[in-house]
Image (cartoon, grey):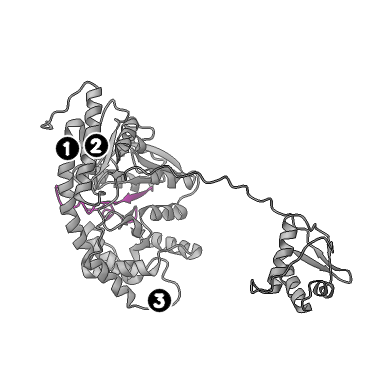
Amino acid sequence: MDSSLPLVLARDGSGPLHLQLAEQFRAAIRDGRLQAGHRLPSTRDLARDLSVSRSVAQAAYDQLHAEGWIAGRTGSGTYVADVVPLQPVLRTPARSPEPAGPPLLTLRPGIPYISPVADAGWKRAWREVSTQAPASGYDHPAGLPELRSALAEHVGRVRGIACGPENLLITDGTSHGLRLLLSVTRQPGDRIAIEDPGFATAVSAARQHELKVVDIAVDEDGILVSDLGPDLSAVYVTPSHQYPLGGRLPVARRNELIRWARRTGATLIEDDYDSEFRYDVAPLPALAQLDLDRVVHLGTLSKVLSPALRLGWLVASPDVVDRLAAYREEVGDWPGWPMQAAFLAMLRDGYLDQVIRRSKRLYSERRNHTCAALAPYGQIVGQDAGLHITLLLPGTDDRALSAEARAAGVVVAPLSDYQRSVPGPPGLVIGYATPPDDVAFHQALDVLSEVLSRHSAGRGTRPDPSGS
């Protein structure tokens, strides 16, 4: 061994001597002071040179050998292994953070109001979970059997779908359910129709699975079934509240869509993302009630309780559910027990229904205020349901307008972000549920109204204060 290599052991309690010694050898190999093939001293010589017991030297060598830093050669000794040292990563100095401005108000769509204080029903559900011992072993890959039974009753009652637990699969939300479905039932190259404008995450999921996305136009009622070709393997649709324009697919067009699917053998993927919230009539029955052999229904808690819960459900034929469950068992991908158990408690306790009733009152009031404040600036669509309205602004650069609103302190989504190849008017997609309180809600509306007023003045138009 090279006698110029310094090895110094601290006997002041800085750690076991053999680990100190092993680390000094590692450092010498990493920085190139010890090269591959370098012969190391025997444990006896090393112990003598460092004035330690031979067991310390042997323990250090054992550790280095186990990690692959050194190797022994029978009858020859111990040598540095052929380890190519990594070059150190050069880290650039962290930039000083820019001074924080005032917090942004948000009118982003798709996020429900969440009270900053947990209410009694929420606490009661988690207390119930805390008194239960977790299940032994792994859960059923389709979800807790008790939850699937309770959900079958729930979706039958509120969505009109005649189903049993064998039709239910618990998911991490609609996006997760969609990705599971595509993984199991679709092949690369399959053609899937998606509404345009539509949900960008659905497009992303389809492309990640190497599907060919076919953009299908929508009108004020929803997807144009007449534009669907015979070579599609699936259609992703939001029939209860088209996202983001808000059309509701009428019965005649729903029947036409089902007949098309039966004729072509395609799968209809129904994203029922915010069907709980209608302000003109009762929630519309789900498309899946017409034919569970052709329709896969996706539901979620994201718009009722919180997107952070990552919990939803999929309703389909027993064959599809079994295939998805088998796939999940293979890859180990299903929701955890605590959230499922808490959701079951919320269903049994009536807490979910209570939240929906309470939220509908709040959202209806906010919807009215939003429409009254913004009607002078453009055409409002999609106001009869959900957590957002869309303000159509023909002839406007909606991305520039969104950036202007953000600079003024309000986050709002441009409609162009949801459009792909089908021509359509620009506009803003405005979520009125998100602000945490009425003060923030009205402040956000005031700021957005000021931005729109300046924009109207710049275009030589004057808003009508009456909204007519």
Q: How far apart are marks 2 and 3 (CA)?
A: 50 Å
Q: Which of 301 and 282 is in front in this view?
A: 301
Q: Where is residue 285 in the image (x, y as percent from the top left)?
A: 22, 53
Residue at image point 19% right, 36% down = 374
Sequence-first tag of 2 and 3: 3
Instruction: Determine which quarter of the picture holds residue 376.
Output: top left
Q: Nearer the viewer, residue 323 or 389?
A: 389
Quarter of the image for the N terminus: give it: bottom right
Sequence-first tag of 1 and 2: 1
Would you call the spot at circle 1 few (<14 residues within 10 Å), some (14-19), or many (20 or more)? some
Q: Where is residue 223 in the image (x, y as percent from the top left)?
A: 29, 40
Which SS class for mark 2? helix
Residue at image point 46% right, 44% down = 207
373 falls in the magenta region: no
- Is the residue under label 3 in contact with that under label 1 (CB below 8 Å)? no
Would you call the spot at circle 3 few (<14 residues within 10 Å), some (14-19), or many (20 or more)? few
Which SS class for mark 3? loop
Residue at image mark 3: 135
Which SS class for mark 1? helix
Q: What stretch is highlighted in magenta?
A: 266-294
Total numbered badges shown on the rendered structure: 3
Q: Which amino acid does label 3 sit on?
A: Ala
- Is the residue under label 2 in contact with that under label 1 (CB below 8 Å)? yes
